[in-house]
Image (cartoon, helix red, strand yellow):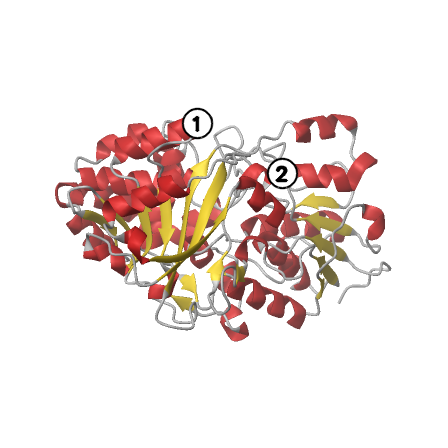
Amino acid sequence: MSSSSHEYDALVVGSGPNGLAAAIRLSLEGLHVKLFEAAETVGGGMRTMEMIREGYRHDICSAIHPMAASSPFLKKLPLDQYGLQWIHPEYPAAHPLDDGSAAVLTRDLHDTAFRLGKDEKKYKSIVKPIVDHWDGLTRDFLGPLNLLPSHPFKMASFGRKGLQPASLFRRHFKTEQGQALFAGLAAHSILPLSSMATTAIGLVFFGSAHTGGWPMPRGGSQSIADAMAAYFESLGGEIETGFKVTSLDELPESKAVLFDLTPYQVIEIVGNRFPAAYVRKLEKFRYGSGAFKIDYILKEPVPWKNPDCAKAGTVHVGGNFEEIAASEKEMDSGSHPHNPFVLVAQQSLFDDTRTPDEKHTLWAYCHVPNSSTVDMTAAIEDQIERFAPGFKDVIDERRTMNTLDFQIYNANYMGGDINGGRQDITQLFNRPVSAFNPYATPAKGIYFCSSSTPPGGGVHGMCGYHAAQVALEQEFGIKGKELKFLL
């Protein structure tokens, strides 16, 4: 156990996946850790609430969790012992097209390839090397820039492909289905598909489908947060909710404070503890595009034209590659596409805890310019109706969230940015300031552990894990073989 003279060894501010991961990682070394959360419940982007009616459980932000299933840190934690149960839909994802067909991403690499017809051999040649070396690759790309990766040749091969814009890499696929499936995955980057490194996002999601899958937690994303919180407390950690930290002076004494917050909030809290030059660099941090989301209660499931879509946890709605690319380009330029790329999650088809009756919930969102207040309801519903005629007739009730609603819900979501900052090539590793030791700050004992650090957005906890590793070495002198827990 710790021998620190402080009231706590370390404090963590913010209880999203990275804050919880950081708190757990520090506690695993026997440190006395306390976590503070502004909201009344832990979770950040992993919350589930009865947003419309009692008994209907809706995921507020994250819904489907391919990166949680693939996270080198999270998958080593005994979260199943604390109530976390993963549910795997029959298909991770489907992508309907206007001719009534659908590209389907299954958990089996060979089955997915076979369904792509003329793209079968090419799909295998691209994705199989990623799947074969998945565990090693995830340790490398789910972390900060590493000039000496653990799998240098495989990482170099992945990098050569991944750094390409998706609009260039698409040439490897000859079929409309193959190109559309790839476009939907790459568009998770919330960037124009002509941007460098958007291919990497698509490749990672291909690989995750064929390794850990794209599961959802039974009961909602809150189940992940609750399990992590319970495990943290079992290690001796303390949690205080309903406490919004506005100044370091409000916190008890400790050797280290880790912030699961974005640069804007940390500047406000830390104040003059940072050198002026560092503050100026933080102020240049760029936030990304936002999200407009609709939660639904449906009288019955979505009447997809293609039946495979009803077997998928996630459905990418947006047409072919050209349409999705045009939509994301228009959004990134500050406009609102008439035919947006829409991400749909169908949790209640696979998890009977989401509704109290035979009705269903649905989760859908599209990308919009940062701080947009434009109502995208009609555009989203027109897109779904396009591939599911009769969809509008099964809507019982809806609730919308624009970018400002997201920011009110979670101050980290600046202007509706759910990724903790734009993740283009200039900020992929250089977040929030530098690619080299991005978690530490010039102020002793102050660290970033949020998605504003590498590897960025997503429920994987790796930003928190890496930040805790740095704090353990710099503040507590624990490193290398002395660490009790290693990936």
Q: Would you say 275 lies left or right of 229 here?
A: right
Identify residue type, mark 2: Pro
Which residue occupies 50% across, 39% down? 148
Q: Is residue 130 visible?
A: no
Return the residue nearer the eye: 100 or 181: 100
C-alpha distance separating marks 1 and 2? 33 Å
Q: Nearer the viewer, mark 1 or mark 2?
A: 1
Q: Which residue is mark 2?
A: 438
Q: Would you say 483 lies left or right of 312 here?
A: right
Displayed quadrant of residue 123: top left
Return the residue nearer the eye: 441 or 422: 422
Q: Residues within 10 Å of mark 2 (few under 14, many from 20)?
A: many
Q: Is residue 450 visible?
A: yes
Q: Determine the secondary structure under disc 1.
A: loop
Residue 311 place in picture, x, y as percent: 26, 60
Return the residue nearer the eye: 307 or 282: 307
- Per the rendering, the mark at residue 335 is 1
Which residue occupies 65% across, 64% down? 28
Residue 261 place in picture, x, y as percent: 65, 45
- State yes or no: discs 1 and 2 in contact (Cβ < 8 Å): no
The quadrant of the image that shows the N terminus is bottom right
Q: Residues within 10 Å of mark 1 (few under 14, many from 20)?
A: some
Q: Determine the secondary structure under disc 2.
A: loop
Q: Would you say 107 lies left or right of 27 here?
A: left
Q: Earlier in the sequence, mark 1 or mark 2?
A: 1
Please say if 288 is above or below 315: above
Residue 109 place in picture, x, y as percent: 24, 53
Which residue occupies 67% across, 57% down? 39
